Amino acid sequence: MGFDLLKGKRGIVFGALNDMSIAWKVAERAVEEGAQITLSNTPVACRMGEVVELGKKLNAEIIPADATNVADLENVFAKSMEVLGGKIDFVLHSIGMSLNVRKKRVYHDLDYNYLTKTLDISAISFHKMLQVGFKMDAISEWGSVLALSYVAAQRTFYGYNDMADAKALLESIGRSFGYIYGRERKVRVNTISQSPTVTTAGSGVKGIDGLIDFSERMSPLGNADALDCANYCITMFSDLTKKVTMQNLFHDGGFSNVGMSLRAMTQYNKSFDENDIKDMY
Ligand SMILES: NC(=O)c1ccc[n+]([C@@H]2O[C@H](COP(=O)([O-])OP(=O)(O)OC[C@H]3O[C@@H](n4cnc5c(N)ncnc54)[C@H](O)[C@@H]3O)[C@@H](O)[C@H]2O)c1
């Protein structure tokens, strides 16, 4: 059901790969709320993936771009303004990839070329997007730019590997650029720190099933799924959140503020036999 929250707005959604992608749900919800959008992903993802179907369904032009390539990003902004007929009101950066994770290189044995790629794809691309938008003056006043993050930026989660460093950098870029973009052009920049979610990128995280179950038990409201995340993104793109900027916004059912929950402890205790548990009290 739509509330016309984005009626008349123009947006660019980066990172929809398939119908599990968070960006896929954001694209669908943005159009439901009255926005016109363009979609972007890597040339390979645009050729081989299901993005073409989404483009048809949403009547959205697909503009391929490697998000680490500044010329590609300039093309996305220029074409989007041309196709949508004006400056852009909102941008979603929903991009992440680690070759160290993919190639099973652990954190104390990183390949540094892979690390450079992880940081470029998953974090510096956000700076590139913002800088391109700023230099081209492509984002309208009170526009809203979002990137998706994870709580491993603040606290250590085994197996999240160099993506933790990428997320810390991503959030820092959101703050640093958010200051300048807000001061100069009244554009807001935020990151949303999302619960673990079943997606293609999510399934690369070591022990993701256990992690999802653990955070579900830890979170008083349970995990936020991709659609919940999309709904939150819509509010952040809408005029209802005009004064929110430079924030890392936790969207995780409360997980980030819980030390230990009864449900998680109950499950943990099941791994001990009765005598062990008695000894614990
Ligand atoms: N799934 C989770 O558990 C979770 C939790 C918190 C945050 N996030 C973040 O949400 C974002 C979206 O991930 P997702 O879970 O929807 O998975 P996803 O795999 O559907 O999306 C990742 C996207 O990044 C794109 N991408 C990779 N390299 C690129 C490049 N060089 N240029 C342009 N695009 C590129 C992929 O093609 C893909 O569309 C990521 O930043 C991810 O880290 C995910």
Image: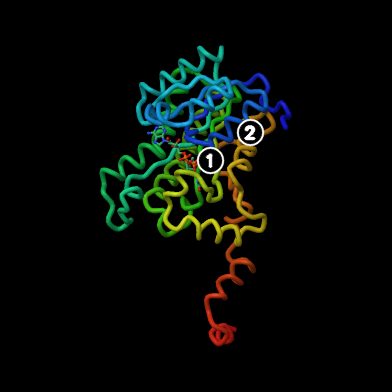
Give the amino acid at mark 2: Ile
Q: Say what secondary structure mark 1 lies in.
A: loop
Q: Position of residue 28 (x, y in %)?
A: 60, 30
- Residue identified by numbered label 1: 20
> Where residue 263 appears, x then y in whole percent?
63, 67
Most foreground residue, 170 or 5:
5
In the displayed structure image, the side of residue 167 where residue 34 appears, left or right: right
Q: Nearer the viewer, mark 1 or mark 2?
A: 1
Query: Which residue is under mark 2?
Result: 234
Residue 250 is situated, as x and y percent measured from the top left of the image, at 58, 47
Amino acid found under the numbered disc labelled 1: Met
* Quadrant (top left/top right/bottom left/bottom right) for the C terminus: bottom right
Q: Earlier in the sequence, mark 1 or mark 2?
A: 1
Q: Is residue 47 above or below residue 98?
A: above
Graded by Cα atoms within 10 Å as few (under 14), some (14 to 19) or many (20 or more), the crowding at tag 1 reads: some
Labelled disc at residue 92:
none
Q: Quadrant of residue 136?
A: top left
Q: How far apart are the alpha carbons under marks 1 and 2?
A: 18 Å
232 versus 144 height, above or below: below
The percent coordinates of residue 170 (x first, y second) are: 45, 41
Is the residue indicated by label 1 positioned so its CB lies within 8 Å of ligand 1? yes
Q: Quadrant of residue 183?
A: top right
Q: How many marks?
A: 2
Ligand 1 is within 8 Å of the C-beta of the residue at disc 2: no
Task: Identify which residue is drawn at 27% across, 56% down.
Answer: 109
The residue positioned 57% from the left and 75% from the top of the image is 269
Say few, some or many: other residues with alpha carbon within 10 Å of mark 2 (under 14 / 14 to 19 / 20 or more).
many
Q: Quadrant of the N terminus?
A: top right
Residue occupying image coordinates x 51% and y 37%: 147
Q: Is residue 122 visible?
A: yes
